Amino acid sequence: MIANYISPLCGRVGAAAVLAFAGISGAPQAWALEPAAAWSSRVSVQEHSVADGLPVLALDRDGWQRLVSVGSGTARAAQRVSAAWEVGHPSGWRLGVVARSQASVSASPGALALAQAVAGDSLPTADTDYPLAVSHMGWRGRGLALGLPWQALGSSTWQWTADAQWLQLTDMRHTRIDGSGRYQVATQAYGFDVHADRASRGIAGPFLGASGTTGEGYSVSFALKGHISPQLAFSVKADDVLSRLSWNRLAREQLRLNTQVTVRRPDGFLDYAPAISGQQSLQNLSTRVGARYDTRLTWQYAPTSAVLARWHRLAGMDELWLGWGTAWPDSSLGLQLGLETVRRALAAKVTWHGFYADLGTDFRGSESEYRQITLGLNLKF
């Protein structure tokens, strides 16, 4: 299962531009409403992987169960990967192409404990119940993106914009597992009563037709930015807050696993039931893109330096960042450093002319619950 930088007056404006590109600007000049002076082009690739209680970078490897630390709440993991090319008109309109994939998984403590027990080398020493609840959603797609120019809110310095994407889906997967498991010391065996519901193009059966070859979807994102004071800036972005993904005629499989396969009738005879029962069908699947929220508060305490507080939310998981940034206008170089206080992750972002790189990690190797990689290039012509 699993990217986003010679007079004193001219010097200050140059510094503001570098800081804005680095994502830490609080300078009003960087958010002026005048149309851009030239066409622009942006190319970017991004991966954002985050988890709570799961090794997000090892979920597709054998033995990941041994890396889990079972807690009292639901464990989650999510990964977003994208590549985009965008062209901007001098008026502020933007048009581009995008390729995206996204996956998320959630698992109850009982499901993780069972995965650990089954993968372990020793059996439980006492009768143990495992309440099970697992959900997984993943998709891939490509399409077109359209962005509006920044618009003023009345006569204030606050501005808003919106972006829309149309996507042709090349893959969609959904799995839901609910039920219970139990280990009994007397029999040294696991018993299950589990319902599983999954949909995927990979499901096949002798009497099941082929799934539809593609799906489609759309998403709309919004952003707002402005100044609370000349040195204090605020921005919020809601990605994919309005969205819909759909796939017509997707193969679906509904199963029940029940290891209690016998029932004793009043006359003493035993009725044997199948351990696994279910059905396969072709059905339409519709869901939403998981929304992502990003809020930033920036205080520019010096002409070329600022501090940043940031809240980020994806798939029910929060990130809380504290950052600092500075710029060297004469060399077009900008640097931003950040600390994520929930997972103790570190991030560094560097901008130079039109190039930017943003890297973040929690340095936990195969047990990592956070990784961010963003590379991009902005050009004007």
Image (cartoon, helix red, strand yellow):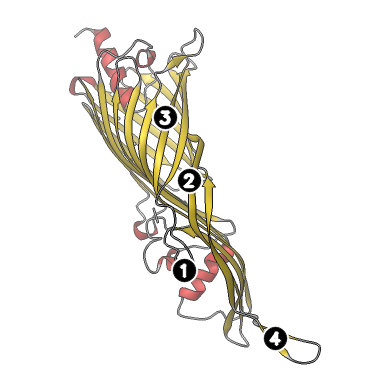
Disc marking residue 271: 4
Mark 1 or 2, nearer chain start = 1
Q: In the rendered image, which residue does mark 3 sit on?
A: 308
Disc marking residue 205: 1
Q: Can residue 290 be seen in this view?
A: no
User: How dense is the environment of label 3, judged by Cα within 10 Å: few (below 14), some, or many (20 and up)?
Assistant: many
Callout 4 secondary element? strand
- What kind of residue is marked 1? Gly
Q: In the rendered image, which residue does mark 2 sit on?
A: 342
11 relative position to 361: left or right: left
- For residue 190, what is the image quadrant? bottom right
Query: Looking at the rendering, in which quadrant would you find the C terminus?
Result: top left
Mark 2 or 3, nearer chain start = 3
- What kind of residue is marked 2? Val
Tell me which residue sits at (25%, 26%) in the image. Answer: 41
Q: Is residue 373 visible?
A: yes
